Image: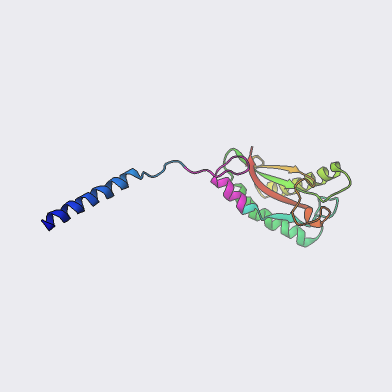
Amino acid sequence: MKKAFYLILVSILATFLLASCESQQPKTDTPTVKADGGGDAAVSMINNQVGDFSIDGFPGGSSKLKASEDLENMKRIVELVKPIVEQVPDGYVMQITGHAADYPTKALQRSVSKGRAYKVYSELKKAGVPAAKMTYKGVGISEPLSGYDGKDAKQRRVSFRAVKK
């Protein structure tokens, strides 16, 4: 009688175990990660990779890097960003954003910041990155670094982010 009871109990447990395994079907949808209003996990990963890349050292009111260490920093970041830009999925581009310190006029801020972005865009093109994979813009002081005064030299920089076309 004990054997029959254990046999029935084991068969019930086995049936329950098999039934629970069958009901847990693997998901076939790829999860998406929202990145800047839409996007996918690849874009989020790319933005995490380039999030700390920043080219700074621009003199006030200029898009030219003069110090050799600043030029070397830009070249080093261009070499780091180049293979990442090539991974940007279809429908997205690497946006190169120029920033400026708080200058007297918004027009000067936009002009200088756009020139900085264009400088890096041009260097990436020279390094072989297809223009269709990139875009550039200047935002002046509208996207300041937190923790720094608007006139701080750290505001004079170029940053990167994958965005929808």
Work out which quarter of the rendered image holds the N terminus and state it: bottom left
Q: Residue 81, image x and y in percent?
A: 64, 52
Q: Is residue 152 above or below residue 44?
A: below
In this picture, residue 157 sits left or right of residue 5: right
Residue drawn 74% across the image and 42% down it: 137
Q: Nearer the viewer, residue 8 or 124?
A: 8
In this picture, residue 161 sits left or right of residue 22: right
Q: Residue 55, image x and y in percent?
A: 73, 55
Q: Residue 124, image x and y in percent?
A: 69, 48
Residue 116, magenta (yes or no): no
Name the quadrant containing residue 54.
bottom right
Farthest residue, direction left = 1
Name the quadrant containing residue 40.
top right
Q: Nearer the viewer, residue 142 or 78?
A: 142
Q: Nearer the viewer, residue 129 or 4?
A: 4
Residue drawn 57% across the image and 39% down it: 90
Work out which quarter of the rendered image holds the C terminus and state it: top right
Q: Nearer the viewer, residue 114 or 1?
A: 1
Farthest residue, direction front = 1
Q: What is the tally of numbered marks visible in this picture? A: 0
Residue 47, magenta (yes or no): yes
Q: Residue 99, image x and y in percent?
A: 77, 48
Residue drawn 28% across the image and 50% down it: 17
The magenta region covers 30-48
Farthest residue, direction bottom = 69
